[in-house]
Amino acid sequence: MALINEHYLKLQAGYLFPEIGRRVSEFITANPDKKVIKMGIGDVTKPLAPSVVKAFHEGVDEMANANTFKGYGPEQGYEFLRKAIAENSYQARGVNISADEIFISDGSKCDTGNIQEIFGHNNKIGICDPVYPVYADTTVMSGKTGTCQANGYYDGIIYMPCTEENNFIPELPTETPDLIFLCYPNNPTGTVASKEELKKWVDFAIANKSIILYDAAYEAFIQDEEIPHSIYEIEGAKSVAIEFRSFSKTAGFTGTRCAFTVIPEELFAYDSKGNAHQVKKLWNRRHSTKFNGVSYPVQKAAAAIFTEEGKKEVTEIIAYYLENAKIIKESLNKLDYKVYGGNDSPYVWAKTKNGLSSWGFFDKLLNEANVVGTPGSGFGPSGEGYFRFSAFAARENVLEAMERIKNLK
Ligand SMILES: *Cc1c(COP(=O)(O)O)cnc(C)c1O
């Protein structure tokens, strides 16, 4: 008899986006003449940049020619891409990360979920609340938690609330996590972490021999020059942090698929006898056993982001989304909503008014303004009473959505 992994049964049904989809299609069926504007799911809308498309085509042409055809590539990723990343995303910012410390993958969602596999079962996991749901769900799947409580917290996870009071940067927890997920610029709050705040976490990890799992998927949106783009800009971080980055939001690769994970040489974790082991070596073993590399044309396309043309084009696309975020933020501000994020991030985190719940505001917005956003409570209990607006929409839709919200009763 085949038995299932029963930890899956602990997962909460009615996952956020399916529930949004259900309510939206119900509304559309009942109101076929209404034009619904979607500012919900965090997916990009602009096409790939011209230089990316050109490199992508060239990659395909090489695969079509016997002289340039490529079979399996290196599991870790082609050196041309790893070198381009090391030079442009790290060394250019004074961060000493080498191509050998970079692993190319088909997405940060997979990497942030899969990474736990190389760490022991008895690790305590620290997760922000609210945050990208993947960290908690994959922790549950791996069997490190108990069941979900009525408040939405799983037993066994150390939750770190991110609220208005702490500026959406969690306080150091009283119980010490062994693995700590941090995500900045944050999804969903759109807020960023300063050098001082990250330093606090790096020092905490050093003192406790913990490891920070730093998700920097929105790094490219950072405008404020004081805000670090990488956790490795913090002294000592290379011995306590893994960084995840993705081309999904940076360069519109959500449907093309390419990301990378950085594991520095000097990052170690321990066995039960207290012996230190290089984490990079373990991940390399995992990656090369369970993964056969990202498609060559996709890696060619990703490398084009780092050419002079590519950089310029990608920066323009990001500027477009950031202008959307600014419009959303300013419009809501004028209507006396309290809003956060949106300066260095494509997300604007708005507090609902009159004590409306996140889903209450969702329904009001959908029914009365025909605008779809994301209820904050879907990202964790501390998101209750908040609402996430995504700036990944066409300008005219953002403007119209804001006009409709202005006319709400
Ligand atoms: C979109 C997103 C990612 C990127 O995931 P991919 O699998 O690379 O597309 C990672 N982390 C967060 C927080 C995100 O919002």
Image (cartoon, rainbow, N blue to C red):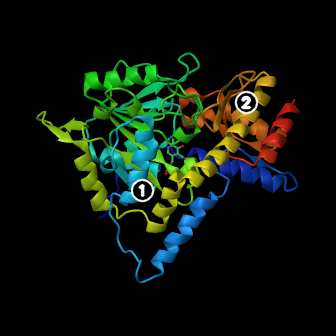
Q: Is residue 358 left or right of residue 249?
A: right
Rendered-image quadrant of the N terminus: bottom left
Q: Which residue is mark 1?
A: 81
User: Which picture quadrant has residue 29?
Assistant: bottom right
The residues tagged by marks 2 and 1 sit, at their Cα atoms, a distance apart of 36 Å
Residue nearest the viewer, comparing 392 with 376: 392
User: Which picture quadrant has residue 33?
Assistant: bottom right
Residue nearest the viewer, comparing 70 with 153: 70
Q: Position of residue 320 (x, y in %)?
A: 70, 44
Q: Which residue is mark 2?
A: 329
Residue farthest to the bottom? 66
Rendered-image quadrant of the C terminus: top right
Q: Residues within 10 Å of mark 1 (few under 14, many from 20)?
A: many
Q: Position of residue 151 (x, y in %)?
A: 51, 29
Residue plotted at (41% across, 46% down): 87
> Would you place residue 323 above or below residue 36 in this image?
above
**Circle number at residue 224:** none
Q: Position of residue 201 (x, y in %)?
A: 38, 24
Q: Position of residue 79 (x, y in %)?
A: 36, 58
Residue kind at label 2, given as amino acid type: Lys
Q: Is mark 1 within 8 Å of ligand 1?
A: no
